[in-house]
Image (cartoon, grey):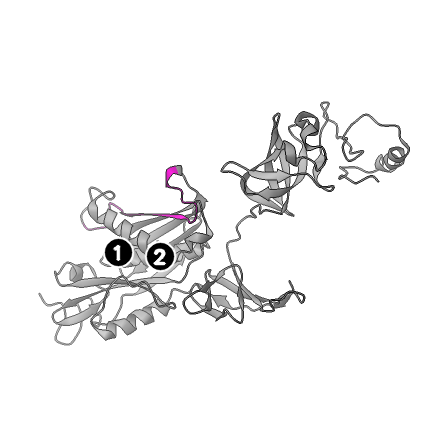
Amino acid sequence: MVVKEEEMVLVTPGEVLGKATEVKAGKGAYVAKHNGLVYASLTGLLRTLSPPPDSPDQRPTVEVTGHKAHGPVPEPGSVVIARVTKVMTRMASADIMCVGAKSVREKFSGIIRQQDVRATEIDKVDMHLSFRPGDIVRASVLSLGDARAYFLSTAKNDLGVVSAESTAGKLVYCISKYDLNIILFYSFWIFCILQIASNIISFITLFKFS
Amino acid sequence: MEFVSPEGLRLDGRRPTEMRQLRAEIGNVAKADGSAVFEMGNTKVIAAVYGPREVQNKSQQMSDQALVRCEYSMANFSTGDRMRKPKGDRRSTEISLVIRQTMEACILTHLMPRSQIDIFVQVLQADGGTRSACINAATLALQDAGIPMRDIVTSCSAGYLNSTPLLDLNYVEDSAGGPDVTVDKVIYVDFALNGRVKASVLWDLWLYFGSYGLKET
């Protein structure tokens, strides 16, 4: 969404921001059903956002940003970075550290179930071969889950273990979609990439080898 | 006893429709999510808001809205004679309930299901109108915490002594034995009145009060 104009207008809860037929209520605003007006619900600066040009609803969105920025919260569909804490037969627990590009302020727990590790052959997944405690994983949030943890999934090509340490404490390289190993496979493609990789420091994210 | 002199002045020199001096500060309690200190004349009240956070007592958790809890207490040193029991007596419980119901009607609780919002209000100095000062302080603390609300709640007390309606009673006028009412009103959206007013002049003054000093910069 493109920011149309940045107004330095301070609003307080209960101030009228417009009619519900003309503007859409974003964060920090709400629509009163009895008279169809959009009111502010937070104290802060008012911003008007233009709608995307291809959407059927061409009303601008009004939102109010408060001065206290709360930390990000995982939402279904967002990509998170998590650290694996426990690996069990049918699931792995992870502590969510970042949501998108921002780090979280409070502790959030996530669970990666056996059927959500990958998209193919989901009943043949061995959790202990897929994850180890301490691995850094990029996952997407499937749902809010139960009271204890979010449900995470790594079933896409750009998701999965991003960085890991071997038992000796060395950084482990990713060499294929499924294998993360410190022992080198002597194959033409991998050999070429490793020539380049041996000069590059830090971790490599998962790429699809076709 | 004469509460309104023949010239029309009250005991502290105010006119019948004049309020006491208002002062407000926000952000005093650093650990709380939101806090405010509100003074109406000599009555001084501090409010701290924690939330929305996880519900501590899982049996009270509501799946579709937030749980609002409120605790009102008076400091031992707030009144002239040192108070023996600042919390748990009937008056504190009743005022806690009133503040909770008022705030619950105003907070958009459906936006924060399965969470809890705690409002703690403590009277540091009591000189009449503590209930009103508490509601005003709680509103400011909730706004400081960034909790979405329908509107700003303002509150004021009024009474009737010596055949004169008086606005914003202090302790002496409050204990005089005449009728008095505390009204909570939201300023922009017309709803949620907790009391009734007889004198129309007080109504205009409440609207004036509502728009005064409650907008923070």
The residue labelled by disc 1 is B130
Residue B176: percent from left, percent from top: 12, 61
Q: Secondary structure at mark 1?
A: helix
Q: Chain of mark 1?
A: B
**Which residue shows up at 12% across the image and 60% down it?**
B177
Q: Is residue A198 left or right of residue B93?
A: right
Q: Is residue B29 left or right of residue A156?
A: left
Disc number at residue B105?
2
Q: Which of label 2 and label 1 is nearer to you?
A: 2
Vertically, is A108 above or below A187?
below
Is residue B20 at all visible to an observer of this figure?
yes
Mark 1 crowd level (few <14, some 14–19, many ≥20, 10 Å Cα): many
Q: Secondary structure at mark 2?
A: helix
The magenta region covers B59-80
Per the image, is B62 magenta?
yes
Q: Chain of mark 2?
A: B
